[in-house]
Amino acid sequence: MDWKSLQALLSGVNKYSTAFGRIWLSVVFVFRVMVFVVAAERVWSDDQAHFDCNTRQPGCTNICYNYFFPISHIRLWALQLIFVTCPSFMVVLHVAYREERERKYRAKHGENTRLYDNPGQKHGGLWWTYLMSLFVKTAVEVIFLYLLQLIYDSFRLPRQVSCKLQPCPNVVNCYVSRPTEKTVFTYFMVGTSVICVILNLCEIFYLIAARMVNLRHRGTVHTSACQIQAESDFDGCRPALKS
């Protein structure tokens, strides 16, 4: 997987993100992608080759390994990183759509005209797109954490498992390679996923709160303007009433 290309694509998201979004992006690259590429892939590189069972029955070891590890941790985390980062592209595409509309508007009405004050400003439809991307990212994180716990029944890898599946002749004991090291990495990846969920929730509440404050401020300004206009109209009519 070309993680450099993914980093180049997500670098454009950073300038449209809030402070929480920038922290989330840093956590994803430093504590998830870097750890995944540098260390985690190597830890799980020999998981099937070093999965030993106390039998020489052909096919028994493969059957037991596929039963206890239906999806490799490393492949599940790779899918999780892809699905988690994809919603951020919604924001980039929306901004690109706004910039294209801005270009066509200026070409039609002149270079001094403007359709948007700032195409990357989170107002209107872009605000909803950004908020929706946060909900999708949070849902994906929770779903993959649930799948990891459901498939392996725990985040802790056992040292030994017992298997009784065909073509195994009887109950055989199988031994997982480097279970402690893999358990440490599993808890680390789960912990960073939880941190990313918390950051997404904080950003959601921040966006909603900022939107409510902005709408309240607009309502206050509009009410004040109406009151000033009403008083001006009344003062303007007052001399006529005296005459």
Image: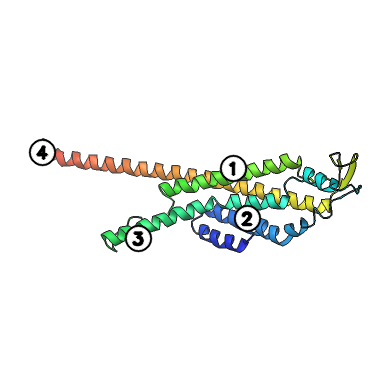
Q: Badges 2 and 1: C-beta atoms under 8 Å apart?
A: no
Q: Marks 2 and 1, Cα distance to the nearest angstrom?
A: 16 Å
Residue 192 visible here: yes
* Left-right relation of 92 to 118: right
The outermost residue toward the top is 241
Indicate which disc, 2 or 1, sits on the residue closer to the N terminus: 2
* Local SS, label 3: helix
Q: Marks 4 and 1, Cα distance to the nearest angstrom?
A: 66 Å
Foreground disc of the pair 4, 1: 1
Type of amino acid at the residue the image marks with label 4: Ala
Closest to the observer, 27 or 240: 27
Judging by the rendered image, the residue that carries numbered circle 2 is 28
The vertical placement of 218 against 110, above or below, is: above
* Local SS, label 1: helix
Question: What crowding class fits label 1: few (fewer than 14 Cα within 10 Å), some (14-19), or many (20 or more)?
Answer: some
Question: What crowding class fits label 3: few (fewer than 14 Cα within 10 Å), some (14-19), or many (20 or more)?
Answer: some
Residue 103's disc is 3
Rendering coords of residue 17 (x, y %): 51, 55
Rendering coords of residue 48 (x, y %): 80, 53
Judging by the rendered image, the residue that carries numbered circle 1 is 139
Q: Badges 3 and 2: C-beta atoms under 8 Å apart?
A: no
Indicate which disc, 3 or 2, sits on the residue closer to the N terminus: 2
Residue 240's disc is 4
Q: Residue at x 53, y 58 (%)?
A: 14
Rendering coords of residue 140 (x, y %): 60, 45
